[in-house]
Image (tube, rainbow, N blue to C red):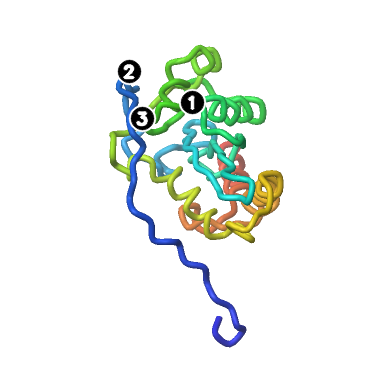
Amino acid sequence: MRQTGLQGRRRPVRRARTTPADPTTPPATDLVRRAFAPADIGAPGRLWVADPTYVATSEGRLYRAAVPDAFGRRVVGWGMADHPRTDLVLDALTTALQRRPPRAGVIRHSDHGRRHTAVASGARLRAAGPVASTGSVGDRFDHAVAERFFATRRVELPSRGEWPTRAAAEGAIFRSIETWDHTRRRHSTLGYLRPAASEEVQQRAAVA
């Protein structure tokens, strides 16, 4: 890297924060218990994780919610908006349901945040079929897949923090997911396979 003039981007040092729990809504049971490895999950469509975050633009924050499939680390649904309300999380869930109709009993794992507990206790989640699961409060390891997903993309996205508009940031995030994440980015958790390749290997093994 020194010979070619390349320099790696470092993750910014941030004060650890946890999402405050909603005291008015009983949390769902933790059905995952940190079993995020593909071998533990078994196949795509069995475990979805969810977490919202935001990126800064000159117009203000662009909030985004994603639903990665924990087996192959493929993003099956996402939503972006200028607000962090429950509708943002619902948009991501709706996209996931449309793009990847889930298996019966698919688990949707999240933290105790108000947006997630509102979805978990709402008619949309019950009607769609995913089973709600939440980790413990104040423990980021219970949400490791979702936390790692956003932490990595904060570093890898080009022109991070330099977008003039929310629309510009939204376009960059969409291109990153569709043209880089799914087909080119390798994951150590997947044996350095790409998400699309990992799912293809699993499908061939299932047929065999």
Q: Could you tell me how far apart the alpha carbons at marks 3 and 2 are, in whole angstroms?
A: 11 Å
Q: Is mark 2 on a helix, strand or loop?
A: loop
- Image coords of residue 27 (percent x, y): 33, 22
3 vs 2, front mark: 2
Q: Which residue lies furthest to the front in this view?
A: 59
Q: Earlier in the sequence, mark 3 or mark 2?
A: 2
CB contact under 8 Å: marks 1 and 3:
no
Q: In this view, does 100 lie to the left or right of 130?
A: right
Task: Provide the residue designation for mark 3.
Answer: 112
Position of the N terminus by quadrant: bottom right
Q: In this view, does 150 lie to the left or right of 170?
A: left
Q: What element carries label 3?
A: loop
Find residue 178 and report its horizontal and vertical position in percent.
Answer: 68, 47
Q: In which quarter of the image is residue 113?
A: top left
Q: Nearer the viewer, residue 202 or 138?
A: 138
Q: Label 1, secondary structure: give it.
A: loop
Vertical order, 7 against 83 (above or below): below
Q: What amino acid type should be assigned to the residue bearing mark 3?
A: His
**Circle 2 residues within 10 Å: few <14, some 14–19, many ≥20:** few
Quickly name the residue at label 2.
Answer: 24
Give the image quarter of residue 159. bottom right
Count neighbours of disc 1 (C-alpha within 10 A) and say few if under 14, some if 14 to 19, many if 20 or more: some
Residue at 58% across / 87% down in the picture? 3
Residue 161 location, quadrant:
bottom right
Q: How many labels does the image show?
A: 3
Q: Where is residue 28 in the image (x, y as percent from the top left)?
A: 34, 22
- Which residue type does callout 2 highlight? Thr
- In the image, residue 153 sits, relative to residue 48, either above or below, namely below
Mark 1, residue position: 106
